[in-house]
Structures are given as structure tokens and as C-alpha cells.
Image (cartoon, helix red, strand yellow):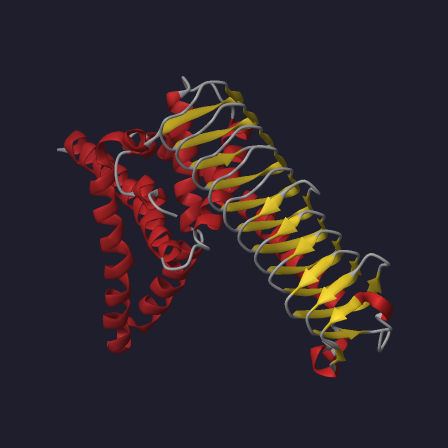
Amino acid sequence: MKRLWLLFLVPILANGQFESGESVSILQEQKDDTYIAGEIINVEATIHGDAIIAGSEIGVRDTIKQDLVVAGGEITISGYVADDIRAAGGSLAMNADVGDDLVMAGGNTHLAKNAKVHGNLINFSGTAHINGEVMGQVKAYGGEIYINGKINDGMELKGGEVVLNGEIHGPSVIAAEHIEIGENAKFHGNVVYWSDDGEIDFKDAMVSGRAIFDENLALDEDGLTWRGLGIAVFGFWLFYVLSAFLVLLLLNWSFKNLFSSAASRFNTGLLKGLGKGLIYLFGLPLLIVVTFMLIIGIPIGLFLATFYIFSVVFGHLVTALLLAHYLNENNGSSWNFWTITLLALAIAIVLRLLMFIPFLGALISIAVIAIGYGLLWLELMDRRKSRLKLTS
């Protein structure tokens, strides 16, 4: 993802353009990476770098020259994106070309007929409509999957209901409770499949290759079905969003002033905070090992280990809330409690998407967690020093 990791390693405003507010419109050309957070967001001008967007209702109607990472409730992308897209939301519509890979996760996802993905398409959703052309491979998992477009390098589909009415080149693997072969379906390669309905008559759909029924693709142990798996995948994502929202709600309600004060250190103490956070991430496990080596230290070690695991699991939420307070401060501290919490949730989803990037995602994850706890550490230490001065 090129330079995205720099967002977490150097002062934020030095690496790109920031826009935030309840309603944000990008109407002028952006020369660098652009980060946008708000409720209603419209991008109507070219962005020459990466774009990271978090909001409720999002529309991208102009060109993104590099990567796009977007999270929100309703997302519509009508502008060309020259590199990868990673998108998560309730409803996602892709109406333009994608220069490389497209990763979508949400309740309903839609690749328009006039859209072309020049790389691979990976889709996790309750309902997926793939009506455009994919130059690479398609991997789709969900409750209902509809293929009406052209796929050039094979596909893997697993869901409750799969309806095929497109042109597929390359090998295909399909597993679903129900598979429907439309009259416009054309397969140029072998199809290995399983359906709860048994073997299927592909009729004239097999232009080349063979259709092979494979019982090994069935997922019916303990009553689990591919539809159930698709629902489970979406349910897991929904559970993550709800649990993240509750954690952010509690953190913001309990420690609003602490997070607000710590967020003010982003411009001046980011690198120092990163260092302190790395000490926490890699130093505390060593302390835990030492306590376990001492018999009297085992209860302390168990407590520290539990605390550490929870802190790592929720670390990106801590940083997301800090970023939300930082953006609020830059916006004149005009946002209310709920706006900050919901914005933090959107930022957390974006951070989670960034962590899926191979190798670089692990580095981003470490940096995100380290910065969050490092800034809080600095704030708490300064508060302690102030109290000691008052008592001395």
C-alpha cells in the first residue's frame, strides 16, 4: 500500500491533506494523500495520492490515483481508482473501473455492469451482485451470490444461493445449497461443484472443460451449511462492529478528558509516544514471563497476561478514539459525544481494513497499538508529575 504506513510513524498533518466535519465535500484537486472523516462525505475532485475515508454516507465521484480504503454505512464509488480498493460497509456500490484488486465486505455489495476490476475481486457479504468484468480471479463468500458479468481467471464461490448467468474463463469451484445456471451462463474451464440439490445439468453452459460434482465440498457437519457460513461471516463482522461500538462508547464516556488531552500530543509527541508504546508492547510480555517464573508471582502474571491480551485486542480502538478527539480538536472542538464515538468507530473499521494488507498490515497493527498506548502513557505520566508537584 505504498506510503500508508507513514500515517502512523510521523506527525499526521505532514503526510497528507486532512478534512473532517459532519459534512465534507472535496471540490478541489488534492496533490497528496488525503484522509477524510465525517458523516456525509462527497469526493468530487481528483486525489493524486492514497485516500482513506471514514463516514456514514460516502460518495466518490472522481479519480483516486492510488489506493482507496473506505468504511461507512452507505458507500458509492463512481470514480476511477488506479490501485487497490478495500471497502467495508452496510451497502457498497462499485460503478467504475478499479486499476488493481477490489476487496469488499458488507451487507449488500454491487459491481456495476460498466465496471471493470483489473486485478482480483474478494467479496464477503450477505448479498453480492457481480455484474461487471473481473480480469483476475473472483473469491466470493456470502448468503446470496449473483454472477452476471465476465470473469477471466476463474472463481471460487461459497454461499447459500449462487445464481450464474455470466461468462467465466478458467477453473471454477462452487459450493452452495442451491446453484442456478442461467441461460446466458458460459464456462470456459472445468467446474468443480457441490449443491444440496445434487448433480446439476449444465446443458449448453459448458463451452469447454467438464462439470464435476464433488461431495468433499459439502459443509454439512453439525448442521452447518454454506448459507449458514455466509451468514456467520456477515454476523461476525456485525458482531465486531457492535462490540467495537460498545467498547468505544465506554471508553469515551469513562475517559473522555483523558483521551482529549492525550490526542493533543499527536502533533508534538507522536514519535515519543510510538517509542513508549513499543516498550509496552514488547516489554510487558517479558515482565509476564518473569512473574510466571516466581511461584508467588503467578497470580500477578495471570492478571498481567489477561490485561495485556485485552489491551492488544482493543488497541486499535484506543488509537481510533484518540484520532477522533484529535480531529475534533482541529475542528474547533465542536462535535458532541455521539459524533466523536461514531467517527471513532468508522476510523476503527478503516484501521482494521489496513491490517489485512499482507506483511505491511502487521507493521501497521503494531504501530497503531503502540502509538495509542504510548500517547496515553505520556499523558498519564505528565498528570502524575503535576500531582506530585502539587503535593510537594
Q: Is residue 228 visible?
A: no
Between 65 and 300, the residue placed more toward the observer is 65
Left or right placement of residue 33 versus residue 54 in this view: left
Please say if 373 is above or below 215. Answer: above
In this view, the residue in front, 392 or 31, is 31
Q: Residue at x 72, y 58 (%)?
A: 167
When asked about the image quadrant of residue 137, the answer is bottom right
Please state if 27 lies on the left or on the right of 4 as rendered. right
Instruction: Pick out the residue farthest to the front.
Output: 207
Q: Position of residue 371 (x, y in %)?
A: 30, 44
Q: Quadrant of the C terminus?
A: top left
At 29% across and 57% down in the image, what residue appears? 281
Q: Is residue 245 above or below residue 239?
A: above
User: Quick check: 74 left or right of 87?
Assistant: right
Extreme residue toward the left, this view: 392
Residue 289, position as x, y percentages in the image: 26, 71
**Residue at figure coordinates x 23%, y 71% from the top left:** 290
